[in-house]
Image: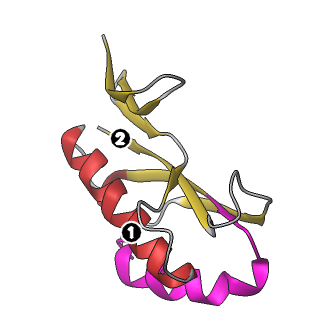
Amino acid sequence: MVKRLHPGPRFCKAVVANGIVTTAGITAADTSGDTAAQTADILAQIDGLLAEAGSSKSNLLTASIWLRDIAHFSQMNAVWDKWVDMDNLPVRATVEARLAAPELLVEIQVTATA
């Protein structure tokens, strides 16, 4: 069985299948903040999606992070390091990328066990 969370016109916010939950690339709901503020916003959204899927950040398998400017890597990591379960770290990739809109500074996608 496949469970699709918050379907929109092009994609779902998350999909749960075969005991795995995968989120879409999540961006900040409030884009007025800096990289740290946007990262905190995104991680709060991810917490909500994982909870809705019956999971949590302690079940993370992978994380992909896109930054508009890799110079903000430490700002993002400061928030990430406070949020992530240090006893259950996922594999992770972080890259600089041109995001869909200029106000978007960070985008994060995760996969976890449900």
Indicate the amino acid at tag 1.
Asp
Q: Is residue 101 above or below residue 18?
A: below
For marks 1 and 2, the one nearer the N-term is: 1
* Callout 2 secondary element: strand
Residue drawn 62% across and 64% down?
104
Indicate the amino acid at tag 2.
Thr
Which quarter of the figure has residue 3? top left
90 lies left or right of 83: right
Q: CA distance from mark 1 to mark 2?
A: 22 Å
Q: Is residue 64 above or below residue 79?
A: above
Residue 37, image x, y percentages: 45, 80
89 lies left or right of 77: left
Q: Is residue 12 above or below residue 2?
A: below
Residue 46, image x, y percentages: 36, 55
Q: Is residue 69 magenta?
A: yes
* Neighbourhood count class around disc 1 (C-alpha, 10 Å): few under 14, some 14–19, many 20 upward: some
81 lies left or right of 6: right
Circle count: 2
Residue drawn 29% across and 46% down?
49
Examine the residues drawn in magenta and state their main secondary structure. Answer: helix
Residue bounds of the magenta highlight:
65-86
- Report which residue position mark 2 lands on: 113
Residue 8, image x, y percentages: 42, 26
Residue 41 marker: 1
Mark 1 vs mark 2: give the one in front: 1
Judge by depth and name the residue closer to the eye, 86 or 8. Answer: 8
Residue drawn 31% across and 64% down?
44
* Callout 1 secondary element: helix
